[in-house]
Amino acid sequence: MSAIHSLFSLLAGLFRPAEHEKISPSDIIPQSAIQHSGNKIIIDLDSVLITGLTRLPAVWIPHIPDTGSMDPVMDSEHNNILIKGQNDADQIVIVDWLFNQPPGNIAVYRTARIYAIHRVIAKGEDELGDYLIFRGDNNRIEDPDLVRREDVRYISLGTIY
């Protein structure tokens, strides 16, 4: 084993998290779709890894409200890049993509109780169909509602700090 490999192994052991791996979002934008030139960063939405869209997704970049529920991933005034379908058919494609991914993605949803941007932590199915369970990263308990397909408004591509 080389000295450099030994050093990296030692450092990895020192900085390894004490607990198990946390769930993370799925890749939506390939690295090849992110270009920079001078003082500009360009994300080519033609390369979104969600197949079946008829048009480029609609983009919304809101400031995150100061709820503390997603600290430290998202905090007050961070800019989150969100997408949704430009039409009903494309929204179904985007929501289907979310429902077919493992837990870890962040999405905006609306139910009778709340409007939230939280992380998917589990999936399930009951007599009404499939659903997602969300929780804010900084919250101790999961969100109270089972989130159905029609409740999902946007999915997150990432946060700009």
Image (cartoon, grey):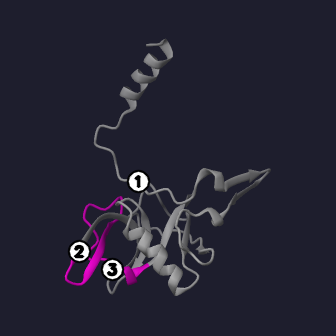
Comparing labels 1 and 2, the label whose residue is closer to the camera: 2
In the picture, the quarter occupied by the C terminus is bottom right
Residue at image location 77% in from the left, 53% down from the top = 39
Comparing labels 2 and 3, the label whose residue is closer to the camera: 2
Depth order, front residue of 64/109: 109
Give the percent coordinates (x, y) of residue 42. 71, 59
- Mark 3 — residue? 148
Depth order, front residue of 120/85: 85
The amino acid pointed to by label 1 is: Ser
Image quarter for residue 34?
bottom right
- Label total for image: 3
Q: Give the range drawn in magenta.
A: 125-152
Outermost residue on the right side: it is: 38
Outermost residue on the left side: it is: 127
Depth order, front residue of 126/37: 126
- Mark 1 — residue? 24
Left or right of 47? Residue 84 is left
Residue at image location 40% in from the left, 21% down from the top = 10
- Mark 2 — residue? 125
Residue at image location 26% in from the left, 80% down from the top = 129
Outermost residue on the front side: it is: 52
Give the percent coordinates (x, y) of residue 31. 61, 51
